[in-house]
Amino acid sequence: MRDFAAELENRKQAGLYRTRRLISGPQQPALVSDGVPLLSFCSNDYLGLANHPDIIRAATDAMPETGLGGAASHLICGHHDAHHQLEVRLAAFTGRSSALFFSTGYMANMGVISALAGRGDTIFSDRLNHASIVDGCILSRARVRRYPHGDMDALADMLAGADGHKLVVTDGVFSMDGDIAPLSELAALCRAHDALLVVDDAHGVGVLGPQGRGSLTELGLSEEDVPVLIGTLGKAVGTSGAFVAGSQLLMDYLVQKARTYIYTTAMPPAIAAATCTSLELIEREDNRRSHLQSLIGEFRRQASLLGYELMPSRTPIQPIMVGDNWSALALSQALEAKGLMVTAIRPPTVPEGQARLRVTFSAAHSREDLSRLLAALAECRSLINRPSAEAV
């Protein structure tokens, strides 16, 4: 029998053991974690909408009409009018012809990728793509070729040497580095090599582009340029679920083929209704994005002056590179002792030797919150240079 206890002990010794926090109350910068008040800089609630009163009201107002549970799959009797209205709204928001509402971003990537490629096909995947993309590629049973992160020359060579149906898949904004994929170049390469381009803009929707319409809209990339757009609703949108958007033909195809859409209970219709309200807020409240960008810019200036190594990101994801696991944990723990929650990210989420603190900003953070984080980082700066034994 496999020695599970030994494996867990090995993870502890390597600084890779993970534990869950017990959060009380709503998601917002001021959290209560395991009974302790903390100021959080590790949420994906980039626009501060997860606890917005208008969105909460939209969900509660919808329940007398929709009930709570989805009760069945979309293809049985679970496809509610509220789901349909959200899909129409998402298509318009993203500038696509049609959309499908999935239960999670993980399920969207798994279902879409495995439906659009199979045995005999080739998928080209950025080496730093999210785990859900990686698993979707595996599930497809297609041949998978991983190209170096953002390396368009390497991808061009791979595409030129491939036959048959080709699918290229990438994150729009990479979740652990915060950088943005070379989307215009990817679209041009896929056109030149007759490859289908799939972009998961989970961390771009709501944050980037005019009215928060995402990375593709920011670059003026149409449905013809990027045929398949995937996004999540539990990050900047502040609700739950995910979507895929594209042509009506592709959406019809996915209804027939995407197993994670077909064989699961539909999301609560009230969540769909709340999401429509959230999209309205995202479109009209540019001040949220302006404030967020101001926080990001000031953090980058001040953290660099403190001597921290940052990554080239203009998004709310601002990793502080540390290196070894124990030093990353020590810095995270020192910040928590000062009342700040900033998660240490370690392998296998990131490559070996690239442990980091993943600082994420929200429009709900104040300038005072930022000042408190920077003051704590100044006091803790020396920790990341200590040997592992001291960091423990």
Image (cartoon, rainbow, N blue to C red):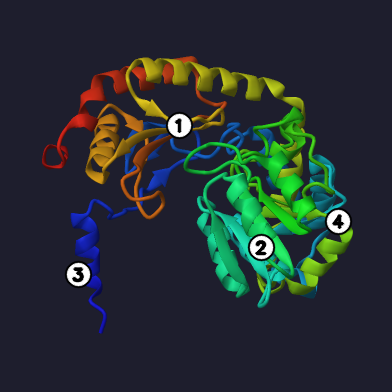
Instruction: Please tell me which of labels 4 and 1 falls first in the chain.
Output: 4
Q: Report whether 70 appears left or right of 178.
A: right
Which residue has dot 4 on it? 247
> Which of pointers 2 and 3 indicates the residue nearer the eye?
2
Q: Are marks 4 and 1 in contact (CB under 8 Å)?
A: no
Which residue has dot 1 on it? 311
Q: 160 and 238: which one is in front? A: 160
Instruction: Please tell me which of labels 1 and 3 falls first in the chain.
Output: 3
Residue type at mark 3: give it.
Ala
The residue furthest bottom is 1
Q: 23 and 144: which one is in front? A: 144
Q: Quadrant of the N terminus?
A: bottom left
Residue drawn 34% across and 48% down?
346
Instruction: Please tell me which of labels 2 and 3 falls first in the chain.
Output: 3
Which residue has dot 3 on it? 6
Q: What separation in Å lies between label 2 and label 3 (alpha carbons)?
A: 45 Å
Q: Are marks 4 and 2 in contact (CB under 8 Å)?
A: no
Which residue has dot 2 on it? 161
Q: What separation in Å lies between label 1 and label 3 (alpha carbons)?
A: 35 Å
Residue 10 x/y as whole percent: 21, 62
- Residue 219's quadrant in the figure? top right
Residue type at mark 4: give it.
Ser
> Which of pointers 4 and 1 indicates the residue nearer the eye?
1
